[in-house]
Amino acid sequence: MDLDPILIKQEPDGVIRVKGTRVRFDTVVTAFNLGATAEEIVQQYPSLKLADVYAAISYYLNNRSDVDAYLNKRKVQAKKVRETNESKFDPSGIRERLLSRREEKKDSHL
């Protein structure tokens, strides 16, 4: 995917961000695809400039197949990371364990 170097920057780990921010490009595209306007996206992510959001949306619309391929690749990567983490740290019962710890901590401070 040919990136617009003025608009977006690819990090060494492959993540593409809106340049000058920590906001991922896929965050903007996903919000747009869910029906958010550029103004709503800026409200949600104040580090973004309205012009940059419009530019990101424009880039997406002009390069939809490349961007969709990138988004699919990111989904696969995220799934692998989630599965790896869940295999190392069993998520079942986590809420109960955390609530129990909080109660124990409260009781010890009394």
Image (spheres, helix red, strand yellow):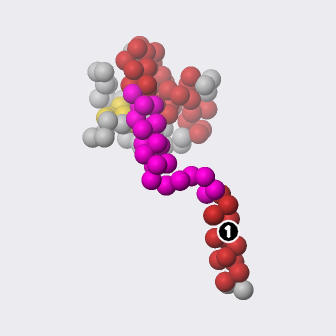
Residue for point 48% across, 22% down: 57
Q: Position of residue 34 (x, y in %)?
A: 61, 25
Q: Indicate whether 92 appears above or below 32.
A: below
Above or below, 12 against 38 in this view is below
Residue situated in front as seen by the camera: 105 or 52: 105
The residue depicted at 32 percent of the width and 29 percent of the height is: 6
At which x and y percent is residue 94? 61, 57
Magenta segment boundaries in residue numbering: 73-94
Residue 11's x, y, as percent? 31, 39
Would residue 80 be found to the left or right of residue 34 on screen? left
Q: Secondary structure at mark 1?
A: helix
Q: What's the residue at 53%, 28% (across, down)?
A: 30
Residue 98 falls in which quadrant of the image?
A: bottom right
Image: 98 above or below 10: below
* Rendered-image quadrant of the C terminus: bottom right
Say how many tags the image has. 1
Q: Mostly what secondary structure, the magenta segment?
A: helix
Tell me the quarter of the picture where residue 59 sits: top left
Q: Farthest residue in the bottom direction?
A: 110
Q: Disc 1 residue type?
A: Ser
- The front one of 28 and 55 is 28
Residue 74 on the magenta span: yes
Which quarter of the rendering shows the N terminus? top left
Answer with left or right where residue 106 lies relative to residue 18.
right
| Magenta-colored stretch includes residue 37 | no
Q: Nearer the viewer, residue 37 or 80?
A: 80
Residue 33 quadrant: top right
The residue beneath circle 1 is: 100
Give percent across and percent down for residue 23: 45, 40
